Image (cartoon, grey):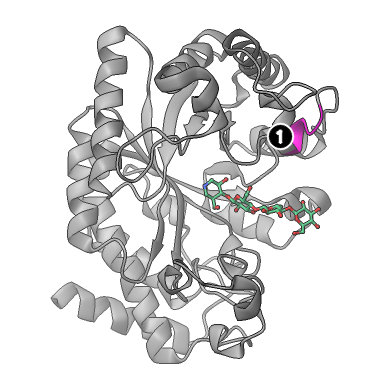
């Protein structure tokens, strides 16, 4: 309790003082605050990679030492048609990362979402054979390796292939390859990507007991079979309530037992929340135009709410630091609230609050609460 009180007073004082200039040398960087604990990352969006002069780059260069591509390496974006490759953004991403000394993360090799139908289906719309799909998967991994070599140090090999109840997701990958999908994917990655690239399984809602148990069983199975798995990727798309701090603590403890390093791969906190929008008869289109779903359209939270948000980040980072010996990296899914995906999910066009930098690219009280936790732990 003592620490929490100190954090909110410190963050409040800093925010009142208006000491919010990201260029201000007096503001310590996140990467230096967590040095020796874990690397700290952010994603580069397609918008940033389009112009290469987005104000977000100043934040990335000051505060982070790892970068992930938000969208540009997804199968459907890089290779929308069998012989069409759109690699400009991905090239810029890797060039920028290596020229500026960042750890570069590849996201994502195999994901059921954002993968075009041509990958799974023949011209008549029938699912292709196991061998044909494996050949396409191998070709994709080989292309990545040949083009960017060992500049990409960490790869999300498979994303979201396990349901919350622990069953395998009924994706087209699974329909064609069956329960061996993950294993086959990691074998291909191990054979095609550089030997020192860290190979990661990445998923969301990792506190769900079923998913957690299957991930742990899969890691142990891979270890027994000599299949490399170098990291468990915990996405970290969390809300103000979910997961509870106890659940978070337990989850990190459970995954740590595997001995495989943990990566928090996609951290953001959905201030507006989303659980109320799921379920039967929810018409997201209608909700879009209802102002009740967008309570702070001017992008400013009431001070008490800003502090509540800052405290949520502080509480989460205290738990992350408790487990820091098992955590390699914490990556934020975006740079500022301006373009974070949660402005459009699950209801489009909301003004959401999710990261440490606001819509003007200035530090928020949550930024200082996280720094304060780093100082004290
Ligand atoms: O590029 C088109 C653009 O041409 C078009 O005008 C615009 C109109 O909607 O859409 C643009 O594509 C969007 C794309 O992001 C780039 O902005 C897609 O509609 C949109 O669906 C896509 O959303 C991304 C989503 O993954 C699906 O790929 C989000 O930005 C991205 O943050 C999100 O990231 C995922 C991780 O990869 C995996 N884990 C969950 C995470 C959040 O969903």
Q: Quadrant of residue 370?
A: bottom left
For the N terminus, the quadrant is bottom left
Q: Main secondary structure of the magenta part?
A: loop
Residue pointed to by mark 1: 116
Q: Nearer the viewer, residue 126 or 243?
A: 126
Q: Secondary structure at mark 1?
A: loop
Residue 157, how many percent across, how many down?
50, 27
Residue 13 visible within the image: no
Q: Is residue 56 left or right of residue 87?
A: left
The stretch of residues the image draws in magenta is 77-81
Residue 18, how many percent across, how many down?
52, 85
Q: Is residue 232 above or below residue 191?
A: below
Residue 71, how many percent across, how many down?
66, 45
Residue at image coords 30%, 43%? 165
Residue 346 visible within the image: yes
Q: Is residue 74 above or below residue 318?
A: above
Q: Quadrant of residue 343?
A: bottom right
Residue at image coords 59%, 41%? 113
Q: Nearer the viewer, residue 49 or 74?
A: 74
Q: Is residue 72 left or right of residue 138?
A: right
Q: Nearer the viewer, residue 207 or 334?
A: 207
Mark 1 surroundings within 10 Å by alpha-carbon count, few (fewer than 14), some (14 through 19), many (20 or more) = some
For the C terminus, the quadrant is bottom left
Q: Is residue 129 left or right of residue 377?
A: right
Residue at image coords 57%, 55%? 62
- Magenta stretch containing residue 137, yes or no? no
Residue at image coords 65%, 39%? 100
Residue 173, how many percent across, how many down?
54, 26
Q: Is residue 231 above or below residue 242?
A: above
């Amino acid at each position: 309790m003592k620490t929490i009180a100190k954090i909110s007073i410190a963050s409040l004082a800093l925010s009142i003082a208006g000491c919010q200039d990201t260029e201000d040398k007096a503001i310590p960087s996140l990467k230096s605050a967590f040095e020796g604990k874990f690397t700290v990352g952010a994603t580069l969006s397609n918008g940033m990679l389009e112009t290469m002069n987005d104000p977000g780059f100043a934040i990335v260069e000051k505060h982070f030492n790892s970068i992930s591509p938000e969208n540009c390496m997804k199968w459907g974006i890089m290779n929308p048609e069998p012989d069409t490759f759109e690699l400009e953004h991905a090239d810029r991403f890797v060039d920028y990362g290596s020229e500026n000394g960042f750890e570069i993360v590849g996201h994502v090799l195999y994901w059921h979402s954002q993968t075009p139908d041509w990958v799974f289906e023949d011209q008549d719309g029938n699912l292709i054979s196991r061998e044909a799909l494996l050949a396409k998967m191998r070709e994709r991994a080989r292309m990545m390796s040949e083009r960017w070599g060992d500049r990409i140090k960490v790869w999300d090999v498979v994303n979201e292939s396990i349901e919350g109840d622990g069953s395998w997701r009924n994706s087209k990958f699974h329909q064609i390859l069956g329960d061996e999908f993950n294993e086959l994917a990691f074998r291909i990655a191990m054979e095609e990507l550089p030997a020192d690239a860290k190979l990661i399984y990445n998923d969301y809602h990792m506190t769900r007991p079923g998913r957690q148990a299957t991930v742990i069983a899969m890691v142990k199975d891979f270890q027994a079979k000599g299949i490399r798995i170098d990291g468990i990727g915990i996405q970290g798309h969390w809300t103000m309530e979910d997961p509870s701090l106890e659940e978070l603590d337990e989850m990190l403890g459970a995954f740590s037992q595997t001995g495989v390093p943990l990566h928090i791969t996609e951290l953001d906190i959905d201030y507006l929340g989303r659980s109320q929008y799921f379920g039967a008869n929810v018409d997201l289109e209608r909700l879009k135009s209802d102002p009740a779903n967008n309570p702070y359209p001017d992008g400013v939270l009431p001070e008490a709410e800003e502090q509540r948000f800052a405290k949520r980040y502080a509480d989460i980072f205290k738990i992350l630091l408790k487990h820091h010996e098992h955590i390699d990296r914490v990556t934020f899914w975006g740079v500022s609230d301006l373009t974070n995906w949660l402005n459009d999910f699950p209801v489009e066009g909301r003004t959401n609050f999710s990261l440490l930098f606001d819509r003007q690219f200035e530090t928020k009280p949550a930024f200082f609460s996280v720094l304060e936790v780093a100082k004290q732990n």
